[in-house]
């Protein structure tokens, strides 16, 4: 089952008055537990990977597993790159498979935040990727949250929120109305009036960071006022730690696998509880029916060259792989040579785009234009190109059965 467009997913939640959980992945146990819960609850889900926790896992290595889990899930899934530090890190997240991004600039003043977020939006939208902005500041209260998000709470201002969304074009807005990252000290006092005013003025999906520790009633009131994405990590971390302590109690001589036994199930129980509380349970089928699938595009060129020897061709291909892979939305660049010596076409490019939107942005990107005009087109006179998406399995079976393919 394909991933779905994150913007479409959250717009569905906004129209129907529920919230999708963005549950943070820090290990394969967390990943397995989150997907397990989503399938059990038949709920849409967002797998979130935060740059602020990259010290605990290798982002490049875990993303193939995250993407594979999303693609084989029986419920709609989106993958979010959370709390990025700069545009370049967001582009890398897109390259690795994320279809939603947040570059957290909430610590900057309004003008800087707006200008830099606009650059992120322009780049991500050219890749078909949704963008979350953050205005106001959600600090950490204690422990790991306080270390990553130091400083004092700064509420989101209505006038700034209106100007920020208009000037940047963000798809969703993370607001500060009294929540904190990490564990909360006591019951948070949330500014529902502020949230209601922001929601009525913007009419776009709103996001809450610091979803752990909220009461059931607080969650319902947040959702009633436009919150359609709630970030959650600390509650999952706590149940995982509790399971480890229980494993130690049962068997003090346990090795690593014994200590981590059933973490996925503990995480799944908490995730499913949140999904049911936030109203996402049972929504999978309608989200799949109404949201655009997220499918990559393959850009294929087969060609012959004139005026170059074999070594020059290899040099040209190596340079193409190097420069074209830097274009936002390009997930991979592959070059090759025909195995058959009598092939009609001798060489090939296969370039993977994250989304159909990249077809146009890639063609017009100055890096591509310079390479194509100066190094490729002058020597590749005879060529064929096509942009295609993989055939769905059912269609593929039809051709195998009926066409003898």
Image: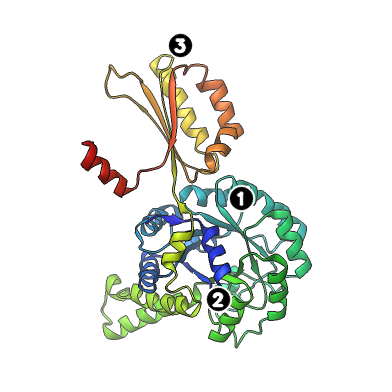
Color scheme of the displayed model: rainbow
Decide: few, some or many residues near mark 2? Use Cα within 10 Å; few <14, some 14-19, many ≥20.
many
Tell me which numbered mark, 3 or 2, is placed earlier along the sequence: 2
In the picture shown, does residue 204 fall above or below 364?
below
In the picture shown, does residue 213 fall above or below 74?
below
For the point 37% across and 43% down, the residue is 390
Residue 306: image location, x then y, percent: 44, 13
Residue placed farthest to the front in the image? Answer: 402
In the picture shown, does residue 107 fall above or below 233?
above
Tell me which numbered mark, 2 or 1, is placed earlier along the sequence: 1
Residue 338: image location, x then y, percent: 32, 24
Q: Secondary structure under badge 2?
A: loop
Q: Secondary structure under badge 3?
A: loop
| Mark 2 or mark 1, whichever is nearer to me | 2
Residue 334: image location, x then y, percent: 40, 34
Contact flag, marks 2 and 1 (Cβ < 8 Å): no
- Confirm whether residue 397 shows in the render: yes
Decide: few, some or many residues near mark 3? Use Cα within 10 Å; few <14, some 14-19, many ≥20.
few
Q: Secondary structure under badge 1?
A: helix
Q: Mark 2 points at which residue?
A: 211
Q: Report whether 104 appears left or right of 19.
A: right
Residue placed farthest to the top in the image? Answer: 307
Q: Name the residue under label 1.
A: 87
Q: Mark 3 points at which residue?
A: 307
Decide: few, some or many residues near mark 1? Use Cα within 10 Å; few <14, some 14-19, many ≥20.
many
For the point 45% across and 23% down, the residue is 315
- Mark seen at residue 243: none
Residue placed farthest to the bottom in the image? Answer: 186
């Amino acid at each position: 089952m394909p991933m779905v467009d994150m913007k479409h997913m959250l717009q569905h939640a906004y129209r129907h008055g529920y919230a999708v959980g963005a549950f943070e992945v820090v290990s394969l146990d967390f990943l397995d537990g989150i997907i397990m819960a989503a399938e059990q609850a038949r709920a849409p889900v967002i797998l979130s990977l935060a740059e602020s926790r990259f010290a605990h896992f290798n982002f490049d290595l875990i993303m193939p597993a995250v993407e594979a889990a999303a693609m084989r899930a029986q419920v709609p899934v989106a993958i979010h790159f959370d709390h990025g530090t700069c545009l370049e890190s967001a582009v890398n997240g897109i390259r690795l498979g994320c279809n939603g991004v947040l570059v957290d600039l909430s610590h900057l003043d309004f003008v800087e935040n707006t200008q830099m977020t606009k650059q992120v939006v322009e780049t991500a939208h050219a890749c078909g990727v949704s963008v979350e902005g953050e205005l106001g500041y959600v600090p950490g209260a204690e422990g790991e949250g306080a270390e990553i998000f130091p400083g004092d709470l700064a509420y989101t201002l209505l006038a700034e929120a209106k100007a920020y969304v208009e000037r940047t074009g963000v798809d969703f807005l993370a607001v500060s109305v009294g929540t904190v990252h990490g564990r909360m000290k006591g019951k948070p006092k949330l500014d529902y009036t502020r949230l209601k005013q922001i929601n009525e003025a913007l009419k776009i999906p709103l996001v809450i960071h610091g979803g752990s520790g909220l009461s059931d009633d607080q969650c319902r009131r947040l959702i009633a006022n436009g919150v359609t994405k709630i970030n959650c990590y600390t509650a999952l971390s706590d149940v995982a730690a509790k399971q480890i302590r229980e494993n130690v109690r049962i068997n003090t001589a346990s090795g690593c696998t014994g200590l981590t036994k059933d973490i996925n199930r503990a995480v799944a129980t908490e995730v499913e509880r949140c999904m049911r509380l936030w109203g996402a349970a049972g929504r999978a089928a309608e989200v799949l029916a109404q949201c655009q699938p997220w499918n990559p595009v393959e850009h294929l060129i087969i060609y012959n060259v004139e005026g170059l020897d074999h070594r020059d061709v290899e040099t040209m291909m190596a340079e193409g792989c190097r420069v074209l892979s830097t274009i936002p939305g390009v997930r991979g660049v592959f070059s090759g040579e025909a195995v058959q010596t009598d092939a009609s076409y001798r060489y090939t490019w296969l370039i993977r785009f994250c989304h159909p939107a990249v077809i146009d942005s890639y063609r017009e990107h100055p890096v591509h234009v310079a390479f194509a005009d100066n190094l490729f087109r002058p020597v590749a006179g005879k060529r064929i190109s096509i942009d295609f998406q993989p055939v769905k399995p059912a269609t593929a079976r039809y051709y195998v059965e009926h066409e003898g393919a």
